Image (tube, helix red, strand yellow):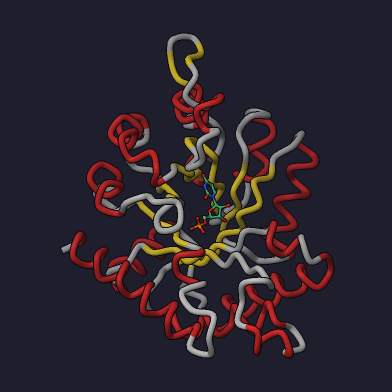
Amino acid sequence: MTTQELIAQIKKKKSFLCIGLDVDLEKIPKHLLNDEDPIFAFNKAIIDATHNLCVAYKPNTAFYEAYGLKGWRALEKTVNYLNEKHPEIFTIADAKRGDIGNTSTRYAKAFFEDLGFDSVTVAPYMGRDSVEPFLAFENKHTILLALTSNEGAFDFQTKLVDGKSLYNQVLETSKAWKNAKNLMYVVGATKAEYFKDIRKIIPDAFLLVPGVGAQGGNLQDVCKYGLNAQIGLLVNSSRGIIYASEGVDFAQAAATKAEALQQEMAAILS
Ligand SMILES: O=c1ccn([C@@H]2O[C@H](COP(=O)(O)O)[C@@H](O)[C@H]2O)c(=O)[nH]1
């Protein structure tokens, strides 16, 4: 998907909501456990109920890898379902990959070509040659970890290196990489006070912003400095939406939570 197609979808739906599909069999409604593929059954119901309210879905691959082959098959069925039924939706494999160049190429092929995701999250710390293999794919997007939502972000990412914080160095250095137009960045909603400085370095890039909902991040705070002329934000909520109810009404309850965020976004955009 091109960035322009993503922006057009955001404007049409008045939403920059990304829903995280982090499926935990211990948290999904019990009646689904009788299904042949409970993970996919859960995702399909959530997608059917919420696709008009969001522009992206982000399965975190850890939640699928944890179930071995069954999990990978459910992940594949989920992204196939999205690509077939809702091709306008932006898909994010939250896999946090990155390795030496030839290995990164295999990761990129796995997520972009085999599974057909629009984007994948990548860790920047092995440097340029570990990220450029992902950037080589036309109309696919590499979402680089910049300033993450967790407490541990302060262990390294905010530390000064040559007078600048490490996450700052990640943003500035990566801008010069080949095909940098295919870069987006992860910035946690819990770090809203950093958005002003981040936008000075990367005014035009899209930011994937996890941490609203269960982690306590606030949409208004993120938008104050995070929004740019092309919107430039994908704000993610996972547990806060998909586990709104444990009952048979779970998908409707998820839609109600998603709609509350979408309405807040529509008001901000207007
Ligand atoms: O900095 C980061 C990077 C990734 N994540 C992931 O996003 C979701 C957040 O889930 P919630 O349930 O809405 O808290 C999850 O998959 C994380 O692994 C993040 O939270 N922070």
In the rendered image, residue 181, in percent from the top left (x then y), is placed at 47, 43
Q: Residue at x 81, y 73 (%)?
A: 70
- Residue 203 higher or lower than 158, as above or below: below
Q: Residue at x 48, y 88 (%)?
A: 249
- Residue 71 higher or lower than 151, as above or below: below
In the rendered image, residue 130, in percent from the top left (x then y), is placed at 69, 34
In the rendered image, residue 256, in percent from the top left (x then y), is placed at 36, 79
Q: Is residue 252 left or right of residue 128?
A: left
In the rendered image, residue 103, in percent from the top left (x then y), is placed at 79, 42
Of 101 and 94, the residue lying toward us: 94
Instruction: State the image quarter where residue 155 is shown.
Output: top right
Of 207 and 23, the residue lying toward us: 23
- Residue 61 higher or lower than 76, as above or below: above
Q: Residue at x 42, y 68 (%)?
A: 55
Q: Is residue 71 left or right of residue 125?
A: right
Which part of the image, by quadrant, shows the C terminus? bottom left
